[in-house]
Amino acid sequence: MAFEASGLLLNYAQTGSSSLGFSSQSIWRVKGGNFFDFVTSTAGSAVAGVTALELVSIGIVILMLTPYFRIIAAVVYYTVERDWKYVAITLFVFSVITSALFIF
C-alpha cells in the first residue's frame, strides 16, 4: 500500500491531479495481459526511471505476489515436515494460481 500511496502523492505533486494519467504506451497494462509479462515490464521500466505510474505498478505487483510466495513457502514447509497430503494440496493450489496468472 505504501507504493500505491507514494505513487499517487508523486503524481499529485507533479501534476496537481489526484488521478493517474495513462499514456498510449502504458494503457496496455490496464487492459490486461499475462501477469508475468506485467511483472517483467514493470521491473524493466522501473529500472529506466521511477514515475508515479511505476510506483503504483510496483505496489500492485507486490500485493499480487504476496499470496503466491506464501504458497511457495507452504510447499517448502510441508515438504520439510514430510506431510505429503498437504504438499499435494498446496501444489494443486499453486498450479491453479499460476495458471490463472498466465491466463489473466
Image (cartoon, rainbow, N blue to C red):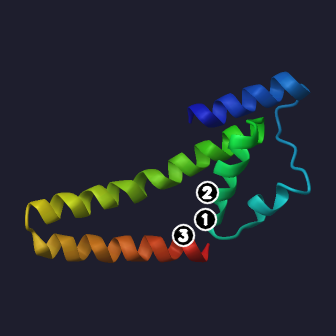
- What x and y, as percent, mark residue 74? 25, 59
Kind of residue at disc 3: Leu
Residue farthest to the front, as pictured: 48
Sort mark 3 into few (<14), some (14-19) or many (20+) by Cα contacts within 10 Å: some
Precedes in sequence: disc 3 or disc 2? 2
- Where is mark 1, residue-wise? 35
Q: Is residue 27 above or below residue 15?
A: below
- What x and y, as percent, mark residue 19? 83, 38
Toward the viewer: 58 or 48? Answer: 48
Tell me the distance, in whole angstroms, between the alpha carbons under discs 1 and 3: 5 Å
Label 1 secondary element = helix
Toward the viewer: 14 or 36? Answer: 36
Kind of residue at disc 1: Phe
Name the mark on residue 101.
3
Name the mark on residue 39.
2
* Left or right of 51 on screen, residue 14: right
Q: Is residue 33 above or below residue 57?
A: below
Q: Which residue corresponds to the image point at 62% horizontal and 72% vertical from the top-left?
A: 104
